[in-house]
Structure formats: structure tokens, C-alpha cells
Image: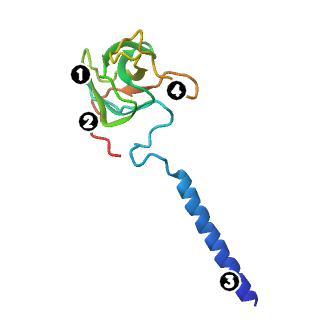
Amino acid sequence: MNTKIFFIIGVIIVVMAGAALFLLGDMKQSDTGGNSSGLVVGKNAIYVAEQVPSRNVLVAVVHLEDLGFVVIHEDASGVPGTILGTSGLLAAGETKSPAAIILLSRVTKDGETIYAMLHLDDGDGVFDAEKDKPAKDSMGGEPVMMIVMVSADAVEPGVVNP
């Protein structure tokens, strides 16, 4: 009798553990329909890998809440400075593989730091630094940007696979 009770309790525990793992696994799945890179943590996000010195910047992934742009700034003592280049108008949602290839006004230098910042379009579809304000993060209201290192040793960026 005791063996039968222990067996039944064991089966119940195994079934409950399996159900718990199944439910927890379901909760960890995002509701993206398989179209997300998994990098997005808010309404606006950007990913740019380390870049080789070049006149172009390859932006791997962009996620925008509304229409917008990626703007590349040079470093001004640890903060974004002069604009070096801008993307064309990007659609709301996620863009990847690559999201944008931005032509710069000059070649970047080995050891340089640049900033890739998201700006939201004011509705006219044309970038204007005065009107198209930086996209803000949902946590602290800070501009959404990525600090990017330029290095001769960087791996040439390729296509991002989902």
C-alpha cells in the first residue's frame, strides 16, 4: 500500500513539475511572431556593432515607436557632438539586416568614438536636427543611442540573422 501511494505521489510531482516548466517556458516566449531580434527592451532601440574606419556606418537593428531616423554624431568630450550623417526615413517597428547604411561627411578614424542616436520624424519625412527630436527611452527619458567604437581591428559587420 505504501509503495502504491509513493508511486502516485511521485507521478503527481513529475506531472506538476512538467506543467510548471511548460508554463514557464511559454511565459519566456515573446509575442513577436518570430520577427524580433530579441534586442528590443523598450519602444525605441538601436544596435550598432563596433565599426572599422570608413565613410559608412552599418546599423544592424533599429526599433522605432514611430517613423524616424538614425543620426551619427561625432564625440564631443564624451557626449554626442556634430552630426556626421543620417539615415533615410525608417518605418515604425523593427528594421534589421541591416537597418541602415549611413554615409558620413568624413571617414571615421581608428580609436574614435561615435554615437548612433534615434530621432523621431516630425511628420514631414525629412530629417531636420531642430524639429526631429531624439527618441527617448521609456525608463528615464534619456535619448536612445549607442556609443560605438571605431577600430581597425573590428570585424567587418555582416548581416544580422534573426
Residue where numbered disc 1 is placed: 55
Q: Distance between the residues labelled 4 and 2?
A: 29 Å
Residue where numbered disc 2 is placed: 156
Q: Distance between the residues labelled 1 and 2?
A: 13 Å
Residue where numbered disc 4 is placed: 137
Nearer-N-terminus badge (1/4): 1
Amino acid type at image mark 1: Arg
Q: Which residue lies furthest to the front in this view?
A: 123
Q: Is mark 3 on a helix, strand or loop?
A: helix
Q: What element carries label 4?
A: loop
Q: Mark 1 or mark 4, which is nearer to you? A: 4
Q: Mark 1 or mark 3, which is nearer to you? A: 3
Nearer-N-terminus badge (4/2): 4
| Front residue of 15 and 48 | 15
Amino acid type at image mark 2: Glu
Image height of 127 relative to 19, above or below: above
